Image (spheres, grey):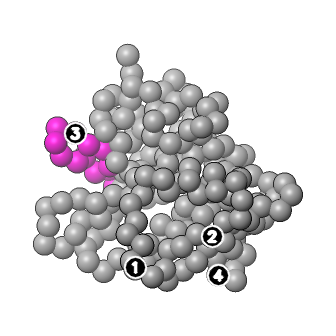
Amino acid sequence: VRIDYDGPDTERVVDFLYRDLAHDGRTPPHVIFSLQRKRETFILRCGQEHRYEGTYAAVAAAILLDASIFHLADQSRDGVLLHAGAVRCSGGCLMLPGKTGAGKTTLTAWLTTQGFGYLTDEFVHLPLGSLGVQFSKRPLNVKAHGRQALAAAIDFGRADTVLAGPNTTLVRPPAVRPAP
């Protein structure tokens, strides 16, 4: 996956989403996204396909994040992918599989407040022939009902760690506060 962007506002969105993901630069992209900002409007395309046009950086970011993860998962051939949240605990990994809307993100964030290490809220890769676990460390995608449940644990007003829109709130893991 490659993401082209055109200026500081779009660079901030891409950095917010992907700064924690490792990339080797050797594998050629099978899909190219373009994120632009013209005046007050964000425009997101995947190849020639128009994905979003609007004023909310958070909405463009959420669509880009979901679509890029879909395309990465679609090309995975060397293991099993689970739609799951995951946290680090006692030298291991606790996986929380579930369908969209089941509460994976909310539970993952809550466990993080209880001292577990955040790994992902989206998918876990189990490589064939290995006992290891790989994950896509990404911002948490907190839905509206999750915002209520996590209000005491996350400062949703921090612009450096939260990107919020009308129905989308992306939260960088450092914004999740451990419980007292």
Contact between labelled residues 4 and 1, with CB atoms less than 8 Å apart:
no
Return the mark for residue 89: 3
**Marks 1, 4: nearer the viewer:** 1
Q: In 3D space, how far apart are the residues under numbered discs 4 and 3 (Cα atoms)?
A: 40 Å
Q: Where 42 falls versus 101 (above or below)?
A: below
**Observer-nearest of 166 and 40:** 40
Residue at 48%, 53% in the rendered image: 19
Nearest-to-viewer mark from 4 and 2: 2
- Which residue has dot 2 on it? 4
Spot occupied by residue 1 in the image (x, y as percentages of width and height) = 50, 74
Cα–Cα gap, marks 2 and 3: 36 Å
Q: 7 or 160, which lies in front?
A: 7
N-term-proximal mark, 1 vs 4? 1
Return the mark for residue 47. Answer: 4
Instruction: Say if mark 2 contacts mark 3, CB within 8 Å.
Output: no
* Helix, strand or loop for disc 2: strand
Q: Is residue 93 magenta?
A: yes
Identified at 28% across, 60% down, the residue is: 134
Magenta segment, which residues? 86-97
